[in-house]
Image (cartoon, rainbow, N blue to C red):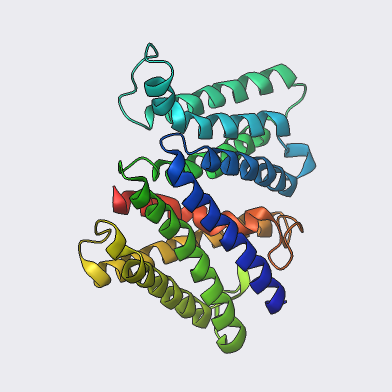
């Protein structure tokens, strides 16, 4: 089990590094980021919807389309500037994202109105549609927006790397500390395998990764953390805690629907949603920190 997690985790980390390094040379479009998020969006949407009770499952094609549309809206400013200057100007990079999300909310109501036959399923199905889009697309948009909060793609690659690797190494630290040292359950009902010892190990790993990135990569670009190593450690702890909440958020969904993993597509981890859950909650913290 541990060997499988290490091997698969190393492969996923290598893919993330390739995405970040290669895409920086394709600014301002960052097509690899768009393609990667779109592919992940399709798979995790299907995994998430399979967790819902059959009677309340929203239509998969509609939810997938809504998530992809919301993610694509993050590229509106680039499309307008590079291809279509006659399009209306957005007052902020979040305006197109909000516009797309509102359109999905309205469309969700219209779909349920059209398919309504008897009471009992329409409102839960509507709520789960919007939960999926909010959870995967709105939170995911914070990761995308890290690409444009600074004009230097080298710096934004660093922002993205921290938003991804800090919570994920926090997960790894928590797993090993919990496996070998765990004695006291942290959330016995929601996630019985989580321990306070694992939590401490995860926080230590998250802080060390943030500091290590700063020491090794930081000198090659403008300072990321004006406060130096102490600020980097604080960032690691803040993002690490957010990652824990992200993991517990998915545990809440799985526990409520009595499912162990979102899927079995990634050995040692479960599904793709089990891999990105911590990043979804960590991305907003990283965004506001650097913003």
Q: Residue at x 49, y 39 (%)?
A: 138
Question: Which of the 4 quarters of the picture holds residue 218?
Answer: bottom left
Residue furthest to the left: 227
Q: Is residue 270 visible?
A: yes
Left or right: 51 with respect to 69? right
Left or right: 66 with respect to 262? left
Closer to the camera in the image, 13 or 49: 13
Q: How many marks?
A: 0
**Where is the N terminus found, in terms of image quarters?**
bottom right
Question: Which of the 4 quarters of the picture holds residue 228?
Answer: bottom left
Instruction: Check the image and report above or below for 23 versus 196.
Output: above
Closer to the camera in the image, 265 or 98: 265
Q: Residue at x 59, y 56 (%)?
A: 15
Q: Position of residue 148 (x, y in %)?
A: 36, 40
Q: Position of residue 183 (x, y in %)?
A: 57, 87
Q: Position of residue 136 (x, y in %)?
A: 56, 43
Q: Residue at x 71, y 48 (%)?
A: 47
Q: Residue at x 59, y 30 (%)?
A: 66
Q: Is residue 120 visible?
A: no
Q: Position of residue 149 (x, y in %)?
A: 32, 42
Instruction: Check the image and report above or below for 56 versus 254.
Output: above
Left or right: 250 with respect to 2? left
Residue furthest to the top: 86
Instruction: Check the image and report above or below for 51 versus 68.
Output: below
Instruction: Check the image and report above or below for 178 versus 140.
Output: below
Question: Which of the 4 quarters of the picture holds residue 46?
Answer: top right
């Amino acid at each position: 089990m541990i060997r499988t997690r290490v091997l698969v985790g190393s492969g996923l980390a290598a893919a993330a590094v390739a995405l970040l390094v290669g895409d920086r040379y394709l600014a301002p479009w960052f097509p690899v980021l768009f393609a990667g998020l779109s592919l992940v969006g399709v798979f995790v949407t299907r995994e998430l919807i399979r967790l819902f009770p059959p009677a309340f499952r929203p239509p998969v094609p509609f939810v997938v389309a809504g998530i992809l549309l919301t993610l694509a809206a993050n590229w509106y400013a680039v499309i307008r500037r590079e291809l279509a200057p006659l399009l209306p100007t957005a007052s902020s990079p979040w305006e197109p994202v909000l516009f797309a999300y509102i359109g999905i909310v309205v469309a969700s109501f219209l779909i349920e109105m059209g398919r309504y036959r008897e009471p009992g399923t329409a409102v839960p199905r509507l709520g789960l549609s919007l939960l999926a889009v909010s959870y995967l697309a709105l939170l995911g948009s914070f990761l995308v927006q890290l690409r444009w909060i600074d004009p230097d793609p080298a710096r934004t690659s660093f922002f993205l790397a921290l938003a991804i690797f800090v919570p994920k190494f926090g997960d790894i630290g928590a797993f090993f500390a919990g496996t070998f040292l765990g004695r006291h359950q942290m959330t016995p009902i929601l996630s019985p395998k989580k321990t306070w010892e694992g939590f401490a190990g995860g926080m230590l790993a998250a802080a060390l990764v943030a500091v290590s990135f700063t020491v090794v990569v930081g000198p090659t670009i403008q300072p990321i953390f004006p406060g130096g190593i102490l600020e980097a450690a604080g960032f690691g702890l803040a993002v690490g805690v957010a990652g824990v909440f992200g993991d517990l958020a998915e545990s809440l969904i799985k526990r409520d629907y009595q499912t162990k993993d979102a899927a079995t597509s990634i050995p040692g981890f479960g599904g793709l949603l089990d891999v990105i859950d911590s990043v979804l909650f960590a991305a907003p913290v990283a965004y506001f920190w650097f913003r």
